[in-house]
Amino acid sequence: MKRIFATLTLVFTLTQSHAQSVYHFEEGLAIGPCHQYGREALYTDQLAYQLYKGTLKPQEGSVLLTDPKAGEVKWKKVKADSTHRFRGDAFSNGYVYLTYESKKEQTAILTITGQDMIFLNGVPRGGDMYRYGWMHLPVVLKKGKNEIYARVARFGRFGGITANLSFPAKAVSLSTEDLTISDIVPGFKNDSLWTGMVISNMSAKPLTGLEMRTTLAGREIKTPLPPVPAMTLRKIPVLIDGSQVANPGKNEVTMSLSQNGKEIDQVKIAIQSVEPGKQYSRTFVSGLDGSVQYYAVSPQVNGTSAEKPALFLSVHGAEVQAISQARAYKPKDWGVLVAPTNRRPRGFNWEDWGRLDALEVLGIAEKQFKPDPSRIYLTGHSMGGHGTWFLGATYPGKWAAIAPSAGYPTLAAYGSHDGVIPDSAGSPVEAMLLRASNPSNVLALTSNYKSLGVYVAHGDADRTVPVTYARQMRDILGKFHRDFSYYEHIGGEHWYGDISVDWPPLFNFFSWHSIPQDTTVTAIDFKTANPGISSRMRWAGVQQQLNALKYSHIKLTSSKKDLRIEGTTDNVALLSLDLAAFTPGSKVKIVLDGQAPITHEVKGKETIYLKNEDGWKIGGAPTMQEKNADRNGTLKDAFRNRMVLVYATGGSPEEKAWAMDKAKFDAESWYYRGNGAVDIISDKDFDPQQFKDRGVILYGNKTTNVAWDKVLKDCPVTVTNGKISVGDKQFSGADLAAYFIYPRSDSHTASVTVISGTGKLGFQAANANQYFSGGSGFPDLMIFSAEMLKGGIKEVKMAGFFGNDWSVEKGEFVTN
């Protein structure tokens, strides 16, 4: 993109623990292609397979594997250039192998850029695929040769990778390279501004008893901090009191970190106070994980106090900061523009947790600015154009109109670093896995745009996202939509100035549109693939499906005059109808799918439920023990509700080490991908009451993790050493891995995601965490052997979805 991206704020450090020495890796070996990761649960990795098997021996000229297309894949020598960067085709979809001889066991900071993840002496650690340079990993180097395998994706050869070791004097330090910080905004309450800051812990023990004291303009505030595990980093939430800052400009903040009352590090940063009427950033604590996130605002100017403002939600493109997005718009006199972050400049493509970030910010904006509820609009550019297509199709009832600019509709046709979602399956097992990606398929949901105004904008010379994507959507909409506008900017590249987004005709189009009150809407045409993501359109909702993650479709009409609701449904097990439009005491006839009418006497503003079981009949709301719109499964769903990572302490020394290492690897990846922060605790320290109603990510199995019975009571899936049982099916062997989700037995809202195995090799096979790739689909359950890393889909033993009662018997599964 030819857009200039501003950073969140200017940050400077006066005192920081700089490295005493730095070692740059200058030569190594490279191999590729040898792996395939992407936006689905299935993956292959020939190098990891040999590493886990203990047969990996990298030597220049030796053959790792024979590929049907590439032939013999051999290790090649690689050298870094003058900028310490390794480049070339030798490691596309492959690895770079580096070694370091240490004279003693010692701690260090390992910084590698351009890689998806690394194995350090066989242990997985977080990656820096976008080359930000602030992923500084505390590591323990053993005496003698230390081996690093850095995994590189298909684009890795272009940007290359850099790698170095540094040896800081301090074991505990603050880093100011990756701040999440608020502006000080006139007219706002500025006495409790949340800031996200990274603490690095190079010590052998967890950091507890931590407190941060911040001082700004004579105002001091202290924040107790969560624990930071040994040999890792964590982004922690800190408060700043900016209430005494009166003038615009940069202001120095002193940040003092103490442990049990003793100062252990101090840094200084800058916080910006903005001028009235200028774009600004504000932070909040996310309900997903308790981390500090931010959004940006282009405020309304010269609006009349008598009229509630419109609200424009603008979702940014890849590598664009939210504040840069907001600054691309001139302030409007009839509304306020709010730009969420997607949790990172790349984040999750506005799917998964990017979608949830957008909804969190929308909720905050509605409370903060109190907009006219009928005038809420959605727009975005590039990846944000995709976000606009996706969020518009997923939540059609939330917007009066949408305006995607330079956007691609689906991740099946347009991929980024993580590739694309496959558009077809090669086997019944893969078809089951790919069903979990159905919520991403905008093309299957285009009928949801019927109720919206749609403005499509694209430059006809766009080489980043070709204009053919806009033309595709124009042709689709043209077959049924009566309220869309289409504009191609002649000669416009991907970014042709601020008018790429701040286009007056686009906002003029918005001004014609409003959201009708639900009770005035007489026709609904709504599709969803997952009620846990999107269940409701106006007065009708899909509460449960007959076949999980297949598309559900409702087409209904309502007549107050005829006291009648009728229409058709597809793949709906439980339907909700809000009867607020009907007068209490009236008798409404409901006719679904041509069946006999159901008569219901309206008691008031009520919601009724109809169950599709041997024909439609009046039923009840789903119980908390059933699948419902708040807890409907698929593996990723437990990664919210302030999730906590619970690792096993039982089993062999290798199994214990794996559980802790895997939890740290996921926490590091979550931090990098989602600007996130999570609690990591042992199974012995996990108290269900202390972590009530929080999502649980459980590492280990029933044999090794004592928290299993605390949160998975009555779960029909049991993983022990050497065996997996799913209902009456059993799978044996020490090389099996399992991913599955199940309701937390002591909670009505939270779920447990289990990352498990039947032995050392099975646990290692579960190391891959591409469930953090935006749009990647994972079903409720997936069992596979370590041989999948080599043989692919045929080594997936079982995959599928639990029934609406969370049973195996009423679920849908396929097995090999």
Image: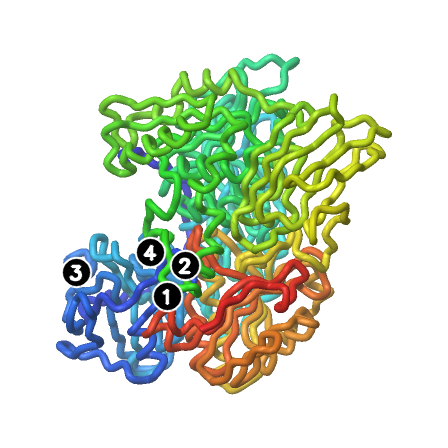
Instruction: Please provide percent x and percent y for residue 131.
Output: 31, 53
Residue under pointer 4: 129
Residue under pointer 3: 89
Q: Sort mark 1 into few (<14), some (14-19) or many (20+) by Cα contacts within 10 Å.
A: some
Q: Is mark 2 on a helix, strand or loop?
A: loop
- The tag earlier along the polypeptide, 4 or 3, is 3
Q: Is mark 1 on a helix, strand or loop?
A: loop
Gap between marks 2 and 3 measured at Cα: 25 Å
- The tag earlier along the polypeptide, 4 or 1, is 1
Disc 1 residue type? Tyr
Q: Sort mark 3 into few (<14), some (14-19) or many (20+) by Cα contacts within 10 Å.
A: some
- The tag earlier along the polypeptide, 2 or 3, is 2
Circles 1, 3 touching at the beta carbon (< 8 Å): no
Query: Residue drawn 41% across and 62% down?
Result: 430
Disc 2 residue type? Glu
Type of colouring: rainbow
Residue under pointer 1: 43
- The tag earlier along the polypeptide, 4 or 2, is 2
Query: Residue drawn 56% across and 63% down?
Result: 812
Residue under pointer 2: 40
